[in-house]
Structures are given as structure tokens and as C-alpha cells.
Image (cartoon, grey):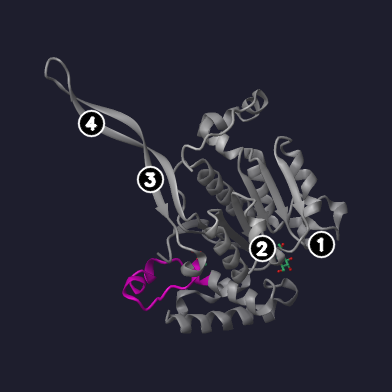
Amino acid sequence: MIGKKSETITEDEAALYDRQIRLWGLDAQKRLRSSRVLVAGACGLGAEVAKNLVLAGVKSLTLLDHRPVTKLDLIANFLVPEDCLTQNIAEASQERAQDLNPMVEVHADPDQLETKTDEYFRDFDVVCITNCTGEEAMRINNICRQHNILFYMGDVLGMFGFMFADLGDHEYVEEVKEKSETEDASGQKHIVEETKMVRRTESFVPMSQALQVDWTSNKYASRLRRTTESYFMMLTIFEFQSLHGRKPDASQRETDIAELLTIKNALMDRLSVPREKVGNQFASLVFGQLSPVCAIVGGVLAQEIIKAVSQKDQPHNNFFFFNTSDGSGVVDNIGM
Ligand SMILES: *[C@@H]1O[C@H](CO)[C@@H](O)[C@H](O)[C@H]1NC(C)=O
Ligand SMILES: *[C@@H]1O[C@H](CO)[C@@H](O)[C@H](O)[C@H]1NC(C)=O
């Protein structure tokens, strides 16, 4: 995709995007404004990603979600006006998202993600899935991989958030500073520093591979200590969602905490990873969606999408985990 010709930018666009063009360059802005993005899941995290990408100036952004607006959504998703209770949440978010930037086509799709097939996803350059099960994310990841669509998924549960990316074999350019020695006419040596643009490729693995690592293999057994416990916490949540068809629910808090711990222990035994790798306290911290966590993970997700679309700078490969307790963000590469 590098070197793809993009159309020129209008005067209005140049004025609106002036600050960003100075930040990431005109070529990056042109690539951005020709990209069509799907954000599935109009939850707090989906709203953050959508807002950031609409402000940045993508060509089009489609918000997909079949659910009705609930009282909890009014707290988590700032794109939904208060008088929209029980309306479709994607449609209810559309107007405020559009108001952020009239130059972006903002669409709402009230269908269910599960009903969408190959053909639907092929109309997008970037697909970002939030608030869905691991199985569904893997299905869509495989479709995206087949059609060279940039794939992202992420979620926020209570104080915990994460994202995953599969960009296939992703080409990008990076600025590198190089020192070299030159000799002037009098034979004196000088060190000069040059900035060069270097082309690189970063290879990703599909989510199915990133979630099915053999922790007894030499490679991964030796990495276990360095691997964040958040990864195993995420696996536990995926399993909870696929068993119960929902996220942990605050209205049945005690039952769900016990169930999360049961799932976690069985999972760790199955993976031959010591149960203590993930402390039990996590189970009480994964209810609802905390807005500041959505803002952080949504900020990282959107930044990664902008980076990948503009093909500038090295992308995070392949997980990012955010832990509110200690305020840490961790990038880890798992499944290679
Ligand atoms: C996420 O999806 C579940 C159904 O799978 C739904 O019950 C829940 O309200 C959604 N959460 C958010 C924050 O959108
Ligand atoms: C988050 O950070 C706290 C404080 O350092 C730690 O006790 C906890 O285990 C961490 N949780 C995860 C999932 O990394």
C-alpha cells in the first residue's frame, strides 16, 4: 500500500487539519482521509475510538451495534443523548459523532455483528471490534486477514482494558537518525547526523494463534515470568463471555466473582500455568465500563489505527493491556 496515490486535499481540509498535518505530515492525512473504518460495539470504548477517528478525519466511519440504549450506556457512551433510552444505540450515537466533523461520513448500522459476512467487511479498510466474544472476534479477524483489512479488537471491563491488533504483514516507514563521518577539504573529520526515512515490515499473527500459546513449550515457559497477568485475565473473561453470552454483571456480583475465579483456576490448570500467576482480586474489578479506562484504551486504539493507516511508525504488535490499579500500560507480543 505504500506509495498509493491519494487525491489532493481541499483548502477547507487543510485549514481544519492544519495542526495534525504539522504533526504527522500531509501524506499521512491523505491516507487517513481515504480510509473507511468500521467500529463495532457502541459501548464506552467504541464511542472513544469513533470520536478520535472522526476528529482525525477518516473518509467514513460506520458504527455498528444492534442493542438498545440502556441506563448504563448513558453513563458510558457520551455520544448518546439522554432522551434516546431504548433506541438503537448505533443510531442514537450517530448525530453527535457527525457533529464532531462534518467532513467525515458517519453511518450507523443497527444490525447484529454476528449476521455480517465476508462481503460486508470487504467495504472497509479498518475493522475495530469492541464488546464482543473471543469467538466472534476470531471469526472477523480471519475474514479481515483474507482480504488485507487492518483488524483491531479491544474491550474495557471495569478497571481493566486491552486491545489486540492483526495487521498481517504491515509495511511502514520510520524516521531514523544516522550518524556518519565526513571529511572536509582540509582532511578534517566531522560527525554529521542525518534523518532518513526507512521502510520496514512488521508481521502479525491472527488472534486464534495469539490466544493458543503452549505455555509448557521452551519458548513460552521461559517467557511466563515476564508475561503480564493481564493476558490470562483476558483469557478468563473471554471464557466467561463464551459460557454465559454476556459480560460479568454488577446485579449478580457475588455469583459472577465466584464464577470468574472458578473459570480462572480451571483455565490456569489446563494451560499448566500456576494459579497464583493471576491474583484473585481481579474478579471484583471487572464490572461495568469506567470512562477514564475507555478514554485511555480508546486513545491508544485510535492512535494505533491512525499510525497503521498512515503507514508511519512502528505499530504495537500485538497486545496492549491497561491496569488501572497501578496505572500501567503494557505492550506484549504473544503468539509469534
Ligand atoms: C456488551 O454486550 C453485551 C451483550 O453481549 C451487553 O449486554 C452489554 O450491555 C454490552 N456492554 C456495553 C458496555 O455495551
Ligand atoms: C494491576 O496492578 C496491581 C498493582 O500493581 C497488581 O496488584 C495487579 O495484580 C495488577 N493486575 C493485573 C491484571 O495486571
Instruction: Quickly name the residue at label 3.
Output: 200
Residue that carries the numbered disc 4 in the rendered image: 180
- Alpha carbon distance from label 2 to label 1: 22 Å
- Mark 4 or 2 closer to N-term? 2
Amino acid type of the residue that numbered disc 4 sits on in the rendered structure? Ser
Q: Is residue 153 magenta?
A: no
> Relative to 20, is 68 above or below?
below
Q: Secondary structure at mark 1?
A: loop
Residue range of the region highlighted in magenta in the rendering: 211-233
In x, y percent, where is residue 114?
69, 67
- Closer to the camera: disc 4 or disc 2? 2
Q: Nearer the viewer, mark 2 or mark 3?
A: 2
View extreme (right): residue: 83
| Amino acid under disc 1 | Pro
Which is more foreground, mark 4 or mark 3?
A: 3
Per the image, the residue denoted by label 1 is 68
Circle 1: is it few (<14), some (14-19), or many (20+) Cα within 10 Å? Answer: some
Residue sitting at x 77%, y 44%? 96
Label 3 sits on a secondary structure element that is strand
Residue 218, quarter of picture: bottom left
Q: Which residue is mark 2?
A: 117
Label 2: state its secondary structure.
loop
Residue type, mark 3 in image: Arg
Q: Label 4 to label 2, Cα distance in Å?
A: 53 Å
Q: Could you tell me if the residues under marks 2 and 3 are in contact, i.e. CB atoms within 8 Å?
A: no
**Residue drawn at 45 percent across, 62 percent down:** 205
Q: Is residue 88 left or right of residue 100?
A: right
Residue 169 position in % (x across, y down): 44, 53
Q: Earlier in the sequence, mark 4 or mark 3?
A: 4
Mark-to-mark CA distance, 4 and 3: 21 Å
Q: Amino acid at mark 2?
A: Thr
Where residue 332 appears, as percent x and y from the top left, is 44, 60
